[in-house]
Amino acid sequence: MVSDMSRKGLIAEPTSRFFVVKCPECSNDTQIVFGWSTLVVKCDVCGKPLLEPTGGKARILGEIVSELE
Ligand SMILES: [Zn+2]
Protein backbone atom coordinates (compact mmCIF):
# COMPACT_ATOMS: atom_id res chain seq x y z
CA MET A 1 0.00 0.00 0.00
CA VAL A 2 1.38 3.36 -1.01
CA SER A 3 1.53 6.03 1.66
CA ASP A 4 1.07 9.36 -0.03
CA MET A 5 0.90 12.38 2.23
CA SER A 6 -0.16 14.55 -0.68
CA ARG A 7 -3.26 12.56 -1.32
CA LYS A 8 -6.25 14.84 -1.15
CA GLY A 9 -9.91 14.26 -0.93
CA LEU A 10 -12.30 13.11 1.69
CA ILE A 11 -12.34 9.44 0.85
CA ALA A 12 -9.86 7.37 2.79
CA GLU A 13 -9.30 3.70 3.33
CA PRO A 14 -9.79 2.87 6.97
CA THR A 15 -7.27 0.70 8.73
CA SER A 16 -8.63 0.84 12.26
CA ARG A 17 -11.95 -0.40 13.45
CA PHE A 18 -13.61 2.76 14.64
CA PHE A 19 -13.25 6.31 13.47
CA VAL A 20 -14.44 9.72 14.48
CA VAL A 21 -15.64 11.32 11.27
CA LYS A 22 -16.43 14.92 10.51
CA CYS A 23 -19.50 15.53 8.42
CA PRO A 24 -18.75 17.56 5.28
CA GLU A 25 -22.21 19.07 5.34
CA CYS A 26 -22.58 20.34 8.89
CA SER A 27 -20.58 21.02 12.03
CA ASN A 28 -20.93 17.52 13.39
CA ASP A 29 -17.39 16.27 13.95
CA THR A 30 -18.05 13.68 16.60
CA GLN A 31 -19.72 10.97 14.57
CA ILE A 32 -18.26 7.56 15.39
CA VAL A 33 -18.42 5.00 12.61
CA PHE A 34 -17.36 1.36 12.34
CA GLY A 35 -14.78 0.94 9.60
CA TRP A 36 -16.11 -2.45 8.59
CA SER A 37 -19.74 -1.51 8.73
CA THR A 38 -22.06 -3.30 6.36
CA LEU A 39 -24.62 -0.55 6.66
CA VAL A 40 -24.59 3.01 5.46
CA VAL A 41 -23.87 5.33 8.37
CA LYS A 42 -25.54 8.71 8.28
CA CYS A 43 -24.75 11.91 10.11
CA ASP A 44 -26.76 12.17 13.31
CA VAL A 45 -27.33 15.86 12.68
CA CYS A 46 -28.11 16.28 8.98
CA GLY A 47 -28.50 12.73 7.71
CA LYS A 48 -25.76 12.89 5.09
CA PRO A 49 -24.17 9.49 4.49
CA LEU A 50 -20.74 9.40 6.11
CA LEU A 51 -19.84 5.82 5.34
CA GLU A 52 -20.87 3.29 2.77
CA PRO A 53 -20.20 -0.42 2.80
CA THR A 54 -18.05 -1.94 0.07
CA GLY A 55 -18.17 -5.57 1.09
CA GLY A 56 -14.92 -5.23 3.01
CA LYS A 57 -13.56 -2.12 4.58
CA ALA A 58 -16.21 0.54 4.43
CA ARG A 59 -15.60 3.70 2.48
CA ILE A 60 -15.61 6.76 4.68
CA LEU A 61 -17.15 9.73 2.95
CA GLY A 62 -16.34 12.35 5.53
CA GLU A 63 -13.11 13.60 7.03
CA ILE A 64 -11.51 11.30 9.57
CA VAL A 65 -10.90 13.31 12.73
CA SER A 66 -9.29 10.50 14.70
CA GLU A 67 -9.04 6.76 14.88
CA LEU A 68 -10.20 4.69 17.81
CA GLU A 69 -8.96 1.31 18.87
ZN1 LIG B 1 -24.02 16.39 9.07
Image (cartoon, rainbow, N blue to C red):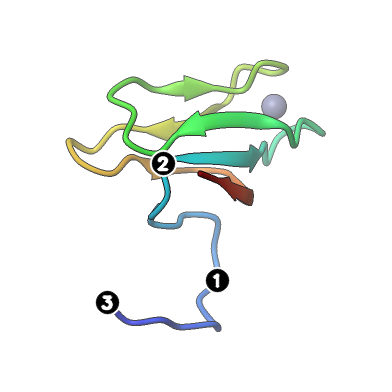
Q: Quadrant of residue 62?
A: top right
Q: Quadrant of the N terminus?
A: bottom left
Q: Residue at x 50, y 76 (%)?
A: 7
Q: Three-letter amino acid code at disc 2?
A: Arg
Q: Which secondary structure, mark 1?
A: loop
Label 1 – label 3 distance at C-alpha: 16 Å
Which of the two residues, 31 or 16, is positioned nearer the viewer here?
Answer: 16
Q: Residue at x 42, y 49 (%)?
A: 16
Q: Residue 47, percent across and down?
A: 61, 17
Q: Ligand 1 closer than 8 Å to the CB at disc 1?
A: no
In the rendered image, the vertical position of residue 50 relative to residue 40, given as above or below: below
Q: Which residue is mark 2?
A: 17
In the rendered image, the vertical position of residue 39 relative to residue 36, given as above or below: above
Q: Which residue is mark 3?
A: 1
In the rendered image, the vertical position of residue 7 relative to residue 10, given as above or below: below
Q: Which residue is mark 1?
A: 8
Q: Judge depth for marks 1 and 3 and give the one in front.
A: 3
Q: Is residue 31 left or right of residue 37?
A: right
